[in-house]
Protein backbone atom coordinates (compact mmCIF):
# COMPACT_ATOMS: atom_id res chain seq x y z
CA UNK A 1 0.00 0.00 0.00
CA UNK A 2 1.26 3.38 -0.89
CA UNK A 3 1.63 5.91 1.87
CA UNK A 4 1.64 9.59 1.12
CA UNK A 5 4.69 11.27 2.63
CA UNK A 6 4.21 14.13 5.06
CA UNK A 7 7.04 16.64 4.96
CA UNK A 8 7.87 18.86 7.88
CA UNK A 9 8.87 22.42 7.14
CA UNK A 10 9.33 24.46 10.28
CA UNK A 11 5.98 24.56 12.04
CA UNK A 12 4.09 23.39 8.97
CA UNK A 13 3.46 20.00 7.46
CA UNK A 14 3.23 19.63 3.70
CA UNK A 15 1.34 16.88 1.92
CA UNK A 16 1.39 16.58 -1.86
CA UNK A 17 -1.38 14.42 -3.25
CA UNK A 18 -0.38 13.01 -6.61
CA UNK A 19 -2.28 9.82 -7.04
CA UNK A 20 -5.93 8.95 -7.07
CA UNK A 21 -6.63 8.21 -3.46
CA UNK A 22 -8.12 4.87 -2.53
CA UNK A 23 -10.04 4.48 0.71
CA UNK A 24 -7.18 2.82 2.55
CA UNK A 25 -4.61 5.36 1.40
CA UNK A 26 -6.89 8.20 2.49
CA UNK A 27 -7.45 6.66 5.93
CA UNK A 28 -3.72 5.99 6.30
CA UNK A 29 -3.07 9.64 5.42
CA UNK A 30 -5.51 10.83 8.07
CA UNK A 31 -3.87 8.60 10.69
CA UNK A 32 -0.33 9.57 9.68
CA UNK A 33 -1.17 13.25 9.62
CA UNK A 34 -2.82 13.19 13.05
CA UNK A 35 0.20 11.34 14.48
CA UNK A 36 2.61 13.77 12.83
CA UNK A 37 0.75 16.83 14.09
CA UNK A 38 0.95 15.41 17.59
CA UNK A 39 4.61 14.42 17.28
CA UNK A 40 5.81 17.70 15.79
CA UNK A 41 3.44 20.22 17.33
CA UNK A 42 2.79 21.55 13.83
CA UNK A 43 0.45 24.52 13.63
CA UNK A 44 -0.21 24.48 9.91
CA UNK A 45 -0.97 21.81 7.33
CA UNK A 46 -0.61 22.50 3.62
CA UNK A 47 -2.25 20.03 1.26
CA UNK A 48 -1.19 20.47 -2.35
CA UNK A 49 -3.65 19.06 -4.88
CA UNK A 50 -2.18 20.69 -7.99
CA UNK A 51 -1.61 17.25 -9.52
CA UNK A 52 -5.25 16.26 -9.24
CA UNK A 53 -7.31 16.78 -12.35
CA UNK A 54 -10.40 15.29 -10.77
CA UNK A 55 -11.63 15.87 -7.24
CA UNK A 56 -14.75 13.86 -6.56
CA UNK A 57 -16.98 13.83 -3.51
CA UNK A 58 -14.74 11.25 -1.83
CA UNK A 59 -11.67 13.45 -1.97
CA UNK A 60 -13.75 16.50 -1.11
CA UNK A 61 -14.95 14.80 2.05
CA UNK A 62 -11.45 13.60 2.86
CA UNK A 63 -10.09 17.15 2.64
CA UNK A 64 -12.84 18.35 4.96
CA UNK A 65 -12.17 15.47 7.38
CA UNK A 66 -8.42 16.13 7.45
CA UNK A 67 -9.10 19.80 8.04
CA UNK A 68 -11.41 18.89 10.92
CA UNK A 69 -8.89 16.49 12.48
CA UNK A 70 -6.16 19.11 12.22
CA UNK A 71 -8.42 21.71 13.77
CA UNK A 72 -9.06 19.71 16.93
CA UNK A 73 -5.31 19.10 17.13
CA UNK A 74 -4.85 22.88 17.04
CA UNK A 75 -3.55 23.18 13.49
CA UNK A 76 -4.88 25.12 10.51
CA UNK A 77 -5.24 23.38 7.15
CA UNK A 78 -4.86 25.14 3.81
CA UNK A 79 -5.62 23.33 0.56
CA UNK A 80 -3.40 24.73 -2.18
CA UNK A 81 -2.94 24.41 -5.92
CA UNK A 82 -6.49 23.54 -6.92
CA UNK A 83 -6.86 23.61 -10.69
CA UNK A 84 -9.57 25.96 -11.99
CA UNK A 85 -11.46 23.10 -13.64
CA UNK A 86 -11.48 21.25 -10.32
CA UNK A 87 -12.92 24.27 -8.54
CA UNK A 88 -15.68 24.52 -11.15
CA UNK A 89 -16.52 20.83 -10.86
CA UNK A 90 -16.52 20.92 -7.06
CA UNK A 91 -19.00 23.75 -6.92
CA UNK A 92 -21.16 22.14 -9.61
CA UNK A 93 -21.18 18.99 -7.48
CA UNK A 94 -22.37 21.08 -4.55
CA UNK A 95 -19.11 20.58 -2.64
CA UNK A 96 -17.95 23.99 -1.56
CA UNK A 97 -15.33 22.74 0.94
CA UNK A 98 -16.93 24.63 3.79
CA UNK A 99 -14.45 25.33 6.55
CA UNK A 100 -11.44 24.50 4.39
CA UNK A 101 -9.07 27.34 3.62
CA UNK A 102 -7.55 27.51 0.19
CA UNK A 103 -4.69 29.30 -1.54
CA UNK A 104 -3.38 29.30 -5.09
CA UNK A 105 -0.02 27.70 -4.34
CA UNK A 106 2.23 26.56 -1.51
CA UNK A 107 3.92 29.93 -1.14
CA UNK A 108 0.61 31.76 -0.84
CA UNK A 109 -0.66 29.08 1.52
CA UNK A 110 2.39 29.55 3.71
CA UNK A 111 1.90 33.32 3.68
CA UNK A 112 -1.75 32.79 4.64
CA UNK A 113 -0.66 30.73 7.64
CA UNK A 114 1.94 33.32 8.60
CA UNK A 115 -0.56 36.17 8.23
CA UNK A 116 -3.12 34.33 10.35
CA UNK A 117 -0.57 34.25 13.14
CA UNK A 118 -0.82 30.53 13.92
CA UNK A 119 2.90 30.06 13.28
CA UNK A 120 3.89 32.89 15.61
CA UNK A 121 3.12 31.23 18.91
CA UNK A 122 6.08 30.18 20.98
CA UNK A 123 7.36 26.75 20.02
CA UNK A 124 6.30 24.03 22.40
CA UNK A 125 8.23 20.94 23.39
CA UNK A 126 7.57 18.10 20.99
CA UNK A 127 4.39 16.07 21.49
CA UNK A 128 3.41 18.31 24.35
CA UNK A 129 0.45 20.22 23.01
CA UNK A 130 -2.03 17.36 23.03
CA UNK A 131 -2.98 15.00 25.77
CA UNK A 132 -0.09 12.58 25.90
CA UNK A 133 -1.99 10.13 28.09
CA UNK A 134 -3.53 8.71 24.99
CA UNK A 135 -0.40 6.84 23.99
CA UNK B 1 -0.02 10.41 -17.91
CA UNK B 2 0.71 11.51 -14.40
CA UNK B 3 2.87 14.54 -13.93
CA UNK B 4 4.76 15.06 -10.74
CA UNK B 5 4.03 18.49 -9.27
CA UNK B 6 6.89 20.89 -8.64
CA UNK B 7 6.25 23.21 -5.73
CA UNK B 8 7.96 26.56 -5.41
CA UNK B 9 9.06 27.63 -1.97
CA UNK B 10 11.00 30.87 -2.03
CA UNK B 11 14.12 30.24 -4.10
CA UNK B 12 13.76 26.48 -3.90
CA UNK B 13 11.72 23.97 -5.82
CA UNK B 14 10.37 20.90 -4.08
CA UNK B 15 9.54 17.65 -5.79
CA UNK B 16 8.03 14.74 -3.88
CA UNK B 17 8.32 11.43 -5.67
CA UNK B 18 5.61 9.06 -4.49
CA UNK B 19 4.97 6.69 -7.32
CA UNK B 20 7.11 4.26 -9.20
CA UNK B 21 8.44 6.35 -12.03
CA UNK B 22 7.88 5.19 -15.56
CA UNK B 23 10.17 6.37 -18.34
CA UNK B 24 7.73 8.96 -19.65
CA UNK B 25 6.95 10.35 -16.20
CA UNK B 26 10.66 10.67 -15.46
CA UNK B 27 11.34 12.48 -18.74
CA UNK B 28 8.35 14.75 -18.19
CA UNK B 29 9.71 15.54 -14.72
CA UNK B 30 13.12 16.46 -16.16
CA UNK B 31 11.49 18.74 -18.73
CA UNK B 32 9.12 20.34 -16.23
CA UNK B 33 11.88 20.89 -13.72
CA UNK B 34 14.22 22.49 -16.24
CA UNK B 35 11.42 24.79 -17.41
CA UNK B 36 10.51 25.67 -13.83
CA UNK B 37 14.11 26.44 -12.86
CA UNK B 38 14.32 28.77 -15.83
CA UNK B 39 10.95 30.39 -15.14
CA UNK B 40 11.50 30.95 -11.43
CA UNK B 41 15.25 31.45 -11.23
CA UNK B 42 15.31 28.84 -8.48
CA UNK B 43 18.70 28.19 -6.92
CA UNK B 44 17.89 24.98 -5.09
CA UNK B 45 15.99 21.81 -5.92
CA UNK B 46 14.86 19.44 -3.18
CA UNK B 47 13.79 15.97 -4.27
CA UNK B 48 12.03 14.01 -1.56
CA UNK B 49 12.15 10.25 -2.03
CA UNK B 50 10.96 9.23 1.44
CA UNK B 51 7.99 7.40 -0.09
CA UNK B 52 10.20 5.19 -2.25
CA UNK B 53 10.94 1.78 -0.81
CA UNK B 54 12.87 0.71 -3.87
CA UNK B 55 15.33 2.82 -5.84
CA UNK B 56 16.65 0.92 -8.80
CA UNK B 57 19.32 1.89 -11.28
CA UNK B 58 16.75 3.70 -13.43
CA UNK B 59 15.73 6.04 -10.63
CA UNK B 60 19.34 6.37 -9.51
CA UNK B 61 20.32 7.55 -13.00
CA UNK B 62 17.31 9.86 -13.15
CA UNK B 63 18.32 11.54 -9.90
CA UNK B 64 21.83 12.03 -11.24
CA UNK B 65 20.47 13.41 -14.53
CA UNK B 66 18.14 15.85 -12.80
CA UNK B 67 21.00 16.96 -10.60
CA UNK B 68 23.15 17.52 -13.71
CA UNK B 69 20.42 19.47 -15.51
CA UNK B 70 19.86 21.65 -12.47
CA UNK B 71 23.59 22.26 -12.15
CA UNK B 72 23.96 23.66 -15.65
CA UNK B 73 20.92 25.84 -14.94
CA UNK B 74 22.78 27.15 -11.87
CA UNK B 75 20.80 25.34 -9.21
CA UNK B 76 21.89 22.88 -6.54
CA UNK B 77 19.98 19.62 -6.08
CA UNK B 78 19.58 17.87 -2.74
CA UNK B 79 17.97 14.44 -2.55
CA UNK B 80 16.22 14.09 0.82
CA UNK B 81 14.43 11.44 2.83
CA UNK B 82 16.16 8.35 1.53
CA UNK B 83 15.21 5.30 3.57
CA UNK B 84 18.15 3.44 5.15
CA UNK B 85 17.28 0.24 3.27
CA UNK B 86 17.34 2.17 0.01
CA UNK B 87 20.78 3.55 0.79
CA UNK B 88 22.06 0.05 1.49
CA UNK B 89 20.60 -1.32 -1.74
CA UNK B 90 21.95 1.58 -3.80
CA UNK B 91 25.48 1.05 -2.60
CA UNK B 92 25.20 -2.71 -3.03
CA UNK B 93 24.08 -2.05 -6.60
CA UNK B 94 27.18 0.07 -7.09
CA UNK B 95 25.16 3.26 -7.42
CA UNK B 96 26.67 5.77 -5.06
CA UNK B 97 24.87 8.83 -6.50
CA UNK B 98 28.13 10.60 -7.24
CA UNK B 99 27.68 14.33 -7.41
CA UNK B 100 24.24 14.25 -5.81
CA UNK B 101 23.92 15.89 -2.42
CA UNK B 102 21.71 14.25 0.16
CA UNK B 103 20.08 15.16 3.46
CA UNK B 104 17.89 13.25 5.89
CA UNK B 105 14.75 15.32 5.43
CA UNK B 106 13.40 18.44 3.75
CA UNK B 107 14.27 20.71 6.66
CA UNK B 108 17.87 19.54 6.73
CA UNK B 109 18.03 19.78 2.95
CA UNK B 110 16.82 23.36 3.12
CA UNK B 111 19.39 24.16 5.79
CA UNK B 112 22.08 22.57 3.63
CA UNK B 113 21.09 24.87 0.76
CA UNK B 114 21.03 27.89 3.05
CA UNK B 115 24.41 26.99 4.55
CA UNK B 116 25.93 26.53 1.11
CA UNK B 117 24.98 30.12 0.34
CA UNK B 118 23.25 29.44 -2.98
CA UNK B 119 20.02 31.02 -1.72
CA UNK B 120 21.75 34.20 -0.58
CA UNK B 121 22.46 35.73 -3.95
CA UNK B 122 20.35 38.71 -4.90
CA UNK B 123 17.08 37.71 -6.57
CA UNK B 124 17.11 38.05 -10.31
CA UNK B 125 14.21 39.03 -12.54
CA UNK B 126 12.20 36.01 -13.56
CA UNK B 127 13.50 33.93 -16.45
CA UNK B 128 16.54 36.14 -16.74
CA UNK B 129 19.39 33.98 -15.57
CA UNK B 130 19.55 31.67 -18.56
CA UNK B 131 19.67 32.48 -22.22
CA UNK B 132 16.11 33.45 -23.05
CA UNK B 133 16.73 33.24 -26.79
CA UNK B 134 16.02 29.57 -26.58
CA UNK B 135 12.30 30.05 -26.26
Image (spheres, coloured by chain):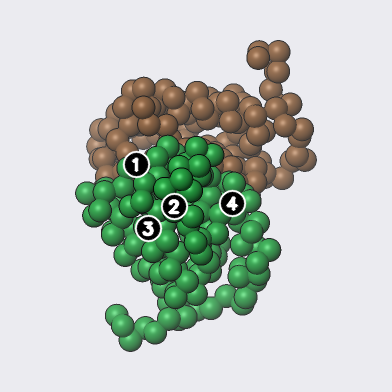
Chain colours: A brown, B green
Secondary structure of the residue carrying tag 1 is loop
Q: Which residue is mark 4?
A: B103
The numbered mark 2 sits on a residue in which chain? B
Q: Earlier in the sequence, mark 3 or mark 2?
A: 3
Camera-near label (2 vs 1) is: 2
Q: Earlier in the sequence, mark 4 or mark 3?
A: 3
The front one of B124 and B54 is B54
Camera-near label (3 vs 2) is: 2
Q: Which residue is mark 3?
A: B61
CB of mark 1 within 8 Å of CB of mark 4? no
Camera-near label (4 vs 2) is: 2
Q: Give the percent coordinates (x, y) of residue A78.
A: 50, 41
CB of mark 3 within 8 Å of CB of mark 2? no
- Check the picture and name the quadrant holding the N terminus of chain A: top left
Secondary structure of the residue carrying tag 2 is loop
- Check the picture and name the quadrant holding the C terminus of chain A: top right
The numbered mark 4 sits on a residue in which chain? B
Camera-near label (3 vs 1) is: 3
Camera-near label (4 vs 3) is: 3
Is the residue A54 above or below the residue B60 in the image?
A: above
Amino acid sequence: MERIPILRMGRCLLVTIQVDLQDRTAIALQDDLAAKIEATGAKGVLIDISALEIVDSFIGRMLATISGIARVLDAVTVVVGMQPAVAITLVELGLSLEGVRTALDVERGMRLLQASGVLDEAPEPEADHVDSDRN
